[in-house]
Image: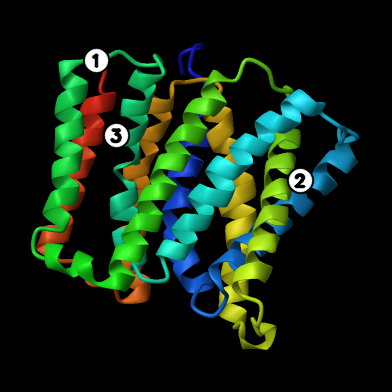
Amino acid sequence: MPKNVDVKLILSMIIVGLVWGTTFLGISVAVETIPPWYSTTIRNFIAASILFIILLFQKEFKWIGWLAFRQQLILSVLMIVLANGFTTIAEQTLPSGLTSIISAINPVVIFLLSISFQLQKATLKGFIGVLLGFSGVLFLFKDGLGDILNPDYKTGVVFLSIAILTWGLGTIYSKKLSYQPNNLTLNLFYQFFLASLIQMVLSVIIYPNSEIETWSAKSIGAVVYLAIFGSVIAMFCYQYALQRVTPIQVSILSYVNTVIAVFLGWYLNNEVVTKDFIVAVILIIIGVFVINYKKK
């Protein structure tokens, strides 16, 4: 193996691609009986608790200062409270496979934001990739554009669109930070803990009469899985990769997530996969590939 190959980086990207591909199905199982904001609150609190224990064991838990605190708060709101929270809400009305397909447009959003914030140059190749990606989404809706008038369906798409945008903004903001502590575990602890506090307040306000006894063991298990694998492990790997490569290169993982999520939605959750669905996946994947492709 060449000496310049970063094995940790490659492993991190593989983990993100595989694990986040399963989280779409995990979220759909969680919200079957647990209200979305409670689901995300518990998920983030468990993740923060795990990281807190690790930090205590390593004797690395500390106050990071107000500047870094503000930066982690912004990342927490953008990437966890809004992006993760709104994706969870969207899956109340959208199948996990469809959610993952629409989310696959995320690399296109990051590409456009990277250009806007001067992290990426505008190129013909990139423009073609953007068109291909959007054509995949349009193809996905070509036979059901009228359904978007359905209040439930429309709500899910709106929430998911906001989630995609805020995730992209969070990714760009994370890449442009000029100051943050080197301890990634400490950063993520603050992000998850702050998100759990904010989402707990939202849970109490939006679902004042939620009955815990109605929550199924299946949904609770899904939340625990999402906390350990989807949040702690995958988020750590995502942030690790983002520190070493460009946002566009990391975003290529989205189409891996999509393929895995669609397969699991079909295999485990009896979701229908049509020919149009497959064509949409292919178009989006080609679009993302064109954006990210480099000869070397």
Q: Nearer the viewer, residue 124 or 288?
A: 124
Q: Amino acid at mark 1?
A: Lys
Residue drawn at x 40%, y 41% as measured from the top left: 165
Q: Is residue 43 above or below residue 280?
A: below
Residue at the spot 88% in from the left edge and 33% down from the top edge = 62
> As rendered, which of 151 and 125 lies closer to the eye?
151
- Side (left or right) of 149 relative to 52: left
Indicate the secondary structure of the residue bearing disc 3: helix
Give residue 202's position: percent from left, percent from top.
63, 62
Label 1, residues with CA under 10 Å away: few <14, some 14-19, many ≥20: few
Q: Which residue is mark 2?
A: 51
Judge the density around disc 2: few (<14), some (14-19), many (≥20) Cα neighbours within 10 Å: many
Distance from label 3 to label 2 (Cα)?
A: 32 Å
Identify which residue is drawn at 60% across, 50% down.
Answer: 231
Where is residue 194 shown, x and y percent of the image?
A: 72, 47
Residue labelled with disc 3:
108
Residue 174 x, y percent position in the rendering: 56, 27
Amino acid type of the residue that numbered disc 2 sits on in the rendered structure? Leu
Q: Are marks 3 and 2 in contact (CB under 8 Å)?
A: no
Label 2: which secondary element = helix
User: Which residue corresponds to mark 1?
Assistant: 295
CA distance for labels 3 and 1: 20 Å
Secondary element at image label 1: loop
What's the residue type where badge 3 is placed?
Answer: Val
Q: Residue furthest front?
A: 205
Q: Residues within 10 Å of mark 3 (few under 14, many from 20)?
A: many
Query: Could you tell me how far apart the alpha carbons at marks 1 and 2 are, in whole angstroms?
Result: 39 Å
Asked whether disc 1 touches disc 2, contact meaning CB atoms under 8 Å apart, the reply is no
Q: Looking at the picture, tell me which residue is in the foreground, 177 or 258.
A: 177
- Counting residues from the N terminus, which is met first, the one under dot 3 or under dot 2? 2
